[in-house]
Amino acid sequence: MNEKDTLRNLQPIVFRQLQNSFEHGRLAHAYLFEGDSGTGKEMMALWFIKHLFCLDLKDNQPCEKCNNCLRISQKEHPDVIEVLPEGQLIKVDQIRELQKELAKSGFESNKKVVLIHQAEKMNVNSANSLLKFLEEPPKDFMIILMTSALGKILPTIQSRSQIIHFQGLAKKHLIQQLQTQENFSVESASLLVDLTNSYQKAVELSNDEWFNEAKETVIQWFRYLEKDDPQGFVYVQKKLVKIFKEKNQQRLAFEMLGYFSKSQRNQVLNDDRAMTEKYNRLLAESLKAIQKLEANVAFQSIAEQITLHVIFK
């Protein structure tokens, strides 16, 4: 699948919005791309920039083959400037250097484009410095700021930019992305996407030692419940309550239990009515457990009730 088709599938609304703005000559001097990591912001930004520099547009789409398109893909075009955080911040000196650079003529054309990554990491001084620049932008200039935390961007910068909202990826796209970019197994990717529809949060969870231990703990509890093993009741007391201490962690335990129940239910044979009913009962118990937890019922009490209802039905 080429870049155009990939972006059209990932972010159809943004794709049409940007393509239409180019075709009708309604280009803003400043864009603010906001959305979770992994939703295609950088790929979309580079694709959009190619519209301005492509030497052989086809149906108002970049050709992806000319020298300019290739250099933009490889981040080697001299008139496309990228700004990334230095450490934890984008510092005021970086913005000042950017202003000096933009005061010069373009190397190969009159156009210059700036791409600022993780724009929420601008400190107060750098954000104010950029704001002054946006108030009187140079001719033939475009800036694209990208952020996964819109609330951390100065309202005055937001008001001077065209905000482009990137929606969370459809589950199938997010699973595929985690498999291809992070080398996750389909099982791990499916679980993470069920727990959070965010690429960034899915990656963070997968790298969290506590989460990986917690996942294995719930899997073992699920196996006891699946086999009607009374050891599951003891397991709640000896293991489960020691791992899941905070309320958000406890909710995650029941969410994972629900996921494993759904996953196994979808794999059993249609004529295995007994197992299908068991998984449906487990799923129902996990959903009720979340409601009880929100009503401040003790986690251990809820987990023990689930075990009793399933094993000693």
Image: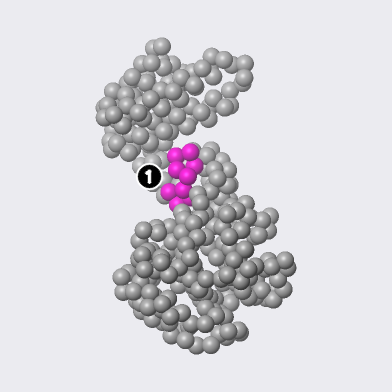
Q: Is residue 210 visible?
A: yes
Residue located at (56% from left, 41% from top): 186
Residue 175 vs residue 254: left or right?
right
In what quadrant of the picture does the C terminus appear?
top left
The amino acid sitting under disc 1 is: Glu
Instruction: Give residue 101's position: percent from left, percent from top.
Output: 47, 84
In what quadrant of the picture does the N terminus appear?
bottom right
Instruction: Give residue 234's position: percent from left, percent from top.
Output: 32, 21
| Residue lying furthest top | 313
Q: Which residue is mark 1?
A: 209
Relative to residue 267, is residue 192 depicted above or below?
below
Q: Nearer the viewer, residue 159 or 301?
A: 159
The span shown in magenta is: 193-201
- Residue count near mark 1 (Cα–Cα under 10 Å), binned few <14, some 14–19, many ≥20: few
Q: Is residue 179 visible?
A: no
State the SS at label 1.
helix
Instruction: Give residue 264's position: percent from left, percent from top.
Output: 53, 27
Taken as a whole, is the magenta stretch helix, strand or loop?
helix
Q: How many marks?
A: 1
Q: Nearer the viewer, residue 188 or 146?
A: 146
Relative to residue 240, is residue 23 depicted above or below?
below
Residue 216 vs residue 43: left or right?
left
Location of residue 223 (image quadrant): top left
Residue located at (36% from left, 30% from top): 290
